[in-house]
Amino acid sequence: MTDQYQGYTPPPGQQYPQQPQYPQQPQYQQPQYQQPAAQHQPAPQTEFYQQQAVGSNVAAGSTADSLSSNEFLVEIDGERATGVFAIAGLSSYSLKMEDGKPVGMDFPPIVVTKMVQQDSNLPFNRWTRETVAARGTRLPTRNVAIIAMDEGVETRRWIYHKAWISNIRFSDFDTALDFLIEEKITIQHGGVEEVWTR
């Protein structure tokens, strides 16, 4: 009984007025959730990724004879350098070209990305301190070796002779980030020697 009929008593033999009949609402059916199919993310369209994709079809039972990008060491004048994240620009052979003809060897620089270390006696810190103190009046040089490893065994090394530092820069300080500050060191050199150790 609705509020509008409260306190109302029908005469004898009569009933309460009939409530209006509303059409029945259709029953709601919850749609079935379908999980979207996993979408394949294509690899970046660069020369190196395309070569890896082609070479990834290794036959069953065969051994992949290659180098892993995360297995490497760095030495400065024979002393192990720690805290190195990445090496960019590694090259063992580059010709200088003029008018389509080779006119000599080209020595492109390498860029070492490493963590900022506080010990001033570490090999990279000694070298950078000497370089900054010289202010371009002289170029403190080192021999830098990039060593490729395979499960702890040295397989190849690139030795950059008479290497000198041309640029030192750092990643940004940012209170919104929780990353280690990186130091990027650009190294010029007088030539590279590639040594196969196995």
Image: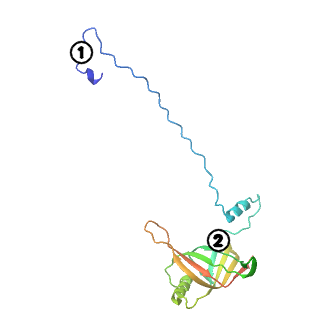
- Residue 124 location in percent, x, y? 56, 82
- Residue 150 location in percent, x, y? 69, 71
The correct choice, above or below, for 41 with respect to 77 in the image is: above
Q: Quadrant of residue 3?
A: top left
Q: Quadrant of residue 85?
A: bottom right
Q: Is residue 81 visible?
A: no
Amino acid type shown at disc 1: Thr
Q: Residue at x 23, y 18 (%)?
A: 8
Tell me the element at label 1. loop
Mark carried by residue 58: none
Q: Residue furthest bottom?
A: 137
The correct choice, above or below, for 143 with respect to 66 in the image is: below
Q: Quadrant of the C terminus?
A: bottom right
Q: Quadrant of residue 96?
A: bottom right
What residue is pinned by disc 2?
71
- Residue 41 location in percent, x, y? 62, 55
Q: Residue at x 52, y 88 (%)?
A: 135
The correct choice, above or below, for 163 with respect to 7 in the image is: below
Q: Nearer the viewer, residue 39 or 147?
A: 39
- Residue 18 location in percent, x, y? 33, 16
The correct choice, above or below, for 105 with respect to 68 in the image is: below
What residue is pinned by disc 1?
9
Q: Residue furthest left?
A: 7
Tell me the element at label 2. loop
